Image (tube, grey):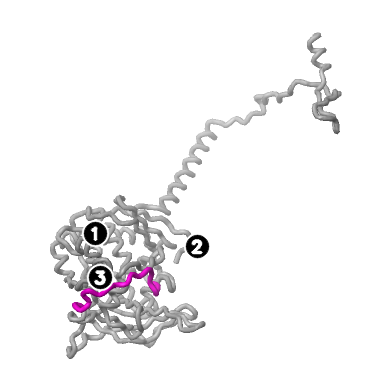
Amino acid sequence: ERARERESNLSIPSIAAGAPHGLTIASDRPLHPPVFSPPPSPSTRTVMSISDFFADRDRRKEMTKQMQKKASQDEFPIKIALDHSPAHISGLETIESYQLDVSVRGKDDVPRIYVPGHAPRLKSPDDLAALDGTTLRKKKGTSFRRPEDVKGSELPLFPVLSKPKFDWQSIHVASSRGILTQLFSIAAQVRGVGPKSNPCQFRARWDDTRELLVFERTQKHTPAQGFGSHFEQLATQPSAVGQPAPYFRIVRFDLSGICIVLAGEVDALDWCPSGKAEPAAVATLEQETLPSVDKILRIDKRGSSCQAQPVELKSKNSRSRPLFRAEANLEQFRVIAQCQLIGCDKVVVGYRRESQLKKPETHSVKKVAKPHKGLLDEIWWSVSQMIRDLQEHLRGKDGGWDVCWKPGADALKVTRAPANIVA
């Protein structure tokens, strides 16, 4: 009792207002022990019955299933098939051609598409041989943009997509050549063809209007660097539009029962000897009905079309390994695929030592591909199965879907693209 009495008489010291540091005065507030709230009585506690507990557990399980279902709908893998079944490109035909001119001539001018366009022509064999010893200039960037960079991702096929009378009922896929080359490269690496390349990515979407699958680019075009652009200028005759003005062809072909419309750039058309009749003209699609897109793009009827064979031009350092060699390698397989997708059978390679060009070499695609025909056909079959799986998963779904692949993976990763960047 005496201890409690002394404790109740204690006071709390405090610093007086305005007093010097360290000077304290007594306060009349007594010191009391802390006060704790009493525990709730059993009558105030929330008690969950057994039935409510299991009902809540089932509700949480159902919510988890719904979240997992939604996640599976927004993301799924595409396994890369590795069966030993053959497939190849067949029935390839040219249905349109055009030339892209992005040079702006005035304040209100816009890029132009010329249909059917002026194709650059490969120089004669004697003129190509005369390039031996020429000094190449290294280019740090292109002076023109890819079609996708001018007006969205549909521009490579715009001259055909804008045709209301074009028969889309038999078409299953619309794409640019670069994306199908990516799929071919992925299938080749999964089948053991090296060396490994960089990750691949593009966008796929289902077109309800035309009932087909559309592949689009998501990455901006990287400007070409090196000696390739100058070699292309030296090996070709300037087109009427001027250099550089890329020339494109739109082709249609069949891949293991899948009908594909594809647009790809053509470096040049094959040389035609003087006095020899020009090849037959391409049957272009009602050029008088070509539309224009105000303030974005203008389409003009200009040029002449022909069925001359396209030519692929490549520049390569002579100190590295030759482009075409006996063993299977990804570099030459990519070139073969690029040529097969556009109907090209001639590749002109300009080997150089430093910046000094040697006599260009001409190769036949059919000849260099013949030793690897079995493996190439199996790779194309894997490509066709990836396309079929994408068709099955994306048919009727809205929005865009990003298709990604990383080196070493055995499947494509498909995820729903953000709504604000869907083309």
What residue do we see at 56% from left, 31% from top? 49
Q: How far separated are the C-alphas under marks 2 and 3? A: 48 Å
**Mark 1 closeness class: few <14, some 14–19, many ≥20 residues within 10 Å:** some
The residues tagged by marks 3 and 1 sit, at their Cα atoms, a distance apart of 26 Å
Q: Nearer the viewer, residue 263 or 286?
A: 263
- The residue depicted at 18 percent of the width and 64 percent of the height is 324
For marks 2 and 3 on the same chain, the one whose residue lies earlier in the sequence: 3
Relative to 383, 289 lies left or right: right
Query: Seen in the image, is 56 located left or right of residue 125?
Result: right
The amino acid at mark 2 is Asn
Whether residue 86 is visible: yes
x, y (%) of residue 411?
Answer: 31, 52
Q: Who's the residue at 16% across and 65% down the image?
A: 369
Q: Is residue 376 above or below residue 310?
A: above
> What span is in magenta?
128-145
Helix, strand or loop for disc 1:
helix
Q: Can residue 92 be seen here?
A: no
Q: Which residue is mark 3?
A: 356
Residue 355 on the magenta span: no
SS category of the residue bearing label 2: helix
**As drawn, 127 above or below 6:** below
Q: Is residue 144 magenta?
A: yes
Q: What's the mark number on residue 330?
A: 1
Name the residue carrying label 2.
Answer: 420
Q: Earlier in the sequence, mark 3 or mark 1?
A: 1
Q: x, y percentage for residue 393?
A: 36, 58
Quadrant in the rendering for residue 3: top right
- For disc 3, the neighbor class at 10 Å (few under 14, some 14 to 19, many from 20) is some
Quadrant where the C terminus sits is bottom left
Q: Quadrant of the N terminus?
A: top right
